[in-house]
Amino acid sequence: MSSAIARKVVQHFKKETPHKQEELSLTSREKQIIDLLVKGALYKEIASELGIGVETVRTHLHKVYKKLHVRTRTEAVVKYLGRN
């Protein structure tokens, strides 16, 4: 392997590290919400279970999506389960 290719490989894996750190930075509330999402709960059910409003659930999930670098609840669940 040439040194140029080796550098590209190393740079590729260095780019992945910040994402892993961001994934680990989920708050306990965000983890509670995504755990309920994993179980198939709807936003309204999550809100009722945790004693918060539906808009609060949406706000937390929006932050989770940003941290996990996803756009949908399905992507969030898949990525969350893949790292556990």
Image (cartoon, helix red, strand yellow):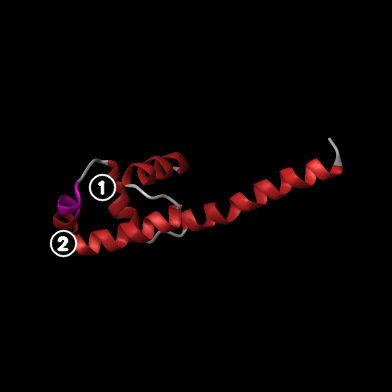
Question: Residue 65: within the magenta?
Answer: no
**Could you tell whether 47 is left or right of 75 in the image?**
left
Q: Which residue is mark 2?
A: 51
Left/right placement of residue 19 relative to residue 29 reads: right
78 lies left or right of 18: left
Q: Amino acid at mark 1?
A: Leu
* Picture coordinates of residue 49, whole percent (x, y): 16, 54
Observer-nearest of 82 and 3: 3
Q: Residue at x 46, y 60 (%)?
A: 25
- Magenta-colored span: 42-46
Residue 72 badge: none
Q: Secondary structure at mark 2?
A: loop
Report x, y in % for residue 75: 38, 43
Most common secondary structure along the magenta stretch: helix
The amino acid pointed to by label 2 is Gly
Give the number of callouts.
2
Residue at left offset 53%, top offset 56%: 21
Q: Quadrant of residue 1?
A: top right
Relative image position of residue 24 (x, y in whole percent)? 47, 55
Residue picked out by circle 1? 36
